[in-house]
Image (cartoon, grey):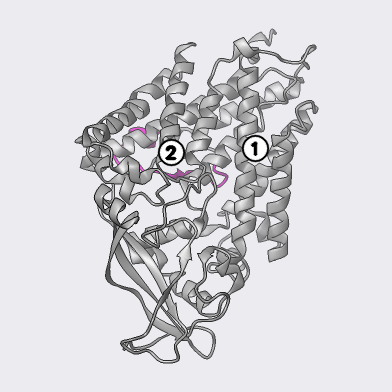
Amino acid sequence: MSWDWFTDPGYWAARLAFQRMLAAIYLIAFVVAANQFRALIGAHGLLPVPEYVRRVSFRRSPSLFHWHYSDRFFAAVAWIGAAVSATLVAGLFDSAPVWASMLAWAVPWALYQSIVNVGQIWYGFGWESLLLETGFLAIFLGPADTAPPVLVLWLLRWLLFRVEFGAGMIKMRGDQCWRDLTCLYYHHETQPMPGPASWYFHHLPRPLHRIEVLASHFTQLVVPFVLFAPQPAAGLAAACMIVTQGWLVLSGNFSWLNVLTITLAVSVLDTSILRVPPSGSVELPFWYRILVILVTALVVALSYRPARNLVGRRQVMNYSFDRLHLVNTYGAFGSITKVRHEVVIEGTDEPELTTDTVWHEYEFKGKPGDPRRRPRQIAPYHLRLDWMLWFVSLSPGYGATWLPKLAEKLLAADKATLKLLRHDPFEGSSPRFLRARLFRYRYTTWRERKETGAWWVREPEGPLLRTGTLGPEGTLLPVRDA
């Protein structure tokens, strides 16, 4: 039996670029986990892992932390994942035996799986599943001194198709503004975390906003089908996706979603003109070929429900049909928020509340706060607390289980929590009282920007969390405002 069909040397360089980019995203994801877990899901965090694994079985959330949890152990898992990812970025396994290369790629996948499955709402974003699904397929791509297997390359195209087409379909089935081409009149202003250029994108002429929407529809609803065409058509489709995803990187902060989508698109590029595989390319072992065929069959079987979801009337987005996130559904912004609200948390160290009490505002690293502060470029780094506060601004129910705990942590000047902030107005000391208010934000006009230097105009709309202080047991005790 001839195995000539099994690999394609024309994608050698594309595979190498894909692996480097994916490893870099893994590295960022593990650093994010290491830097933020203590305050969010640590033993004394807002939603502690130990409490979660006591009520949720291993079968429902496969994770190393079902067998043991401590903050030190979690940190070790995160930093080991970061270290292995760094070796993959550096290409230290490029010439390893096939089994060693597979093991090296399986380690970050298994470790990040363990983190995501106990991360609760903090890890409920679509790009977590996307990283895991992409990482699982990367295990079977083989080391650099082998030609990449065709079946895995096609599975990566199928994944990219679902990411783009799923996002396009959820838009067409969702908000009317996607169909009348007006969603980007609002989106650059109301997106979860604007970037430094978002203000300028918002102020583009409205006809350009309509062109943006049309380009999005074309890239997500038409171009994905071209991924399955012969080259160079498939490569041109991938290049189109790379351009549109780069546009999204410039216009906002969506963690590593856009960079990872670009990474998937890179795997589709026919780089035969750059083909420079090592001389004497290593022969792939028979067991590996059989394993790739079995994995392909598994992914095809698991694709039934995600594929049905794509064409079903009740399409769900960012959902995993299996516990290991092997084949998932994707999509975002089926509906667009047309008015921006922000949660503003304030404290005071005055001993009593009066009508003259001076309140001091906590500043977060990414989300809008001080109207004069320009939005920052955060992505592909992911500020999980900032993102969840955006959801709270849409509906307070998103923070029902953890927002009062956040207030308690700030009142106690918890060091791990304060590390998630950009500015603590009390410089590590405990305030006496704390409150959270909801503000209406909008971008300044060109004239307002020139006259005031501000990026935002904001107005208070009312309380979100009642003014409180720490009770005798360290719990939040509501008090009456002056």
Magenta stretch holds residue 465: no
Q: Nearer the viewer, mark 2 or mark 1?
A: 2
Count of labels in the image:
2
Q: Is the stretch drawn in magenta largely helix, strand or loop?
A: loop
Marks 2 and 1 sit apart, C-alpha to C-alpha, by 22 Å
Quadrant into which the N terminus falls: top right
Question: Where is residue 135 drawn, in percent x and y?
Answer: 61, 37
Q: Circle 1: is it few (<14), some (14-19), or many (20+) Cα within 10 Å?
A: many
In depth, the one of 406 and 159 nearer the eye is: 406
Q: Mark 2 packing: few (<14 Cα in 10 Å), some, or many (20+)?
A: some
Q: Earlier in the sequence, mark 2 or mark 1?
A: 1
Q: Position of residue 92 (x, y in %)?
A: 77, 33
331 to 474, vertically: above or below: above
Q: Position of residue 433 (x, y in %)?
A: 44, 83
Name the side, left or right, on which 328 lies relative to 112.
Answer: left
Q: Amino acid at mark 1?
A: Ala
Residue in front for this viewpoint, 380 or 102: 380
Question: Which residue was labeled with disc 2?
Answer: 250
Q: Which residues are magenta?
A: 308-325
Quadrant for residue 170, please give it.
top left
Tag 1, which secondary structure? helix
Residue 142 shows in the view:
yes
Secondary element under disc 2, as helix, strand or loop, is helix
Foreground of the two, 231 or 228: 231
Which residue type does callout 2 highlight? Leu
Q: Is residue 150 left or right of residue 334?
A: right
Which residue is tagged 1?
23
Kindly tell me whether residue 51 is visible in this rendering: no
List x then y, in percent, for residue 414. 58, 74
- State whether residue 320 is above or below residue 213: below
* Residue lying at 31% horizontally and 45% vertically, measured from the top left: 187
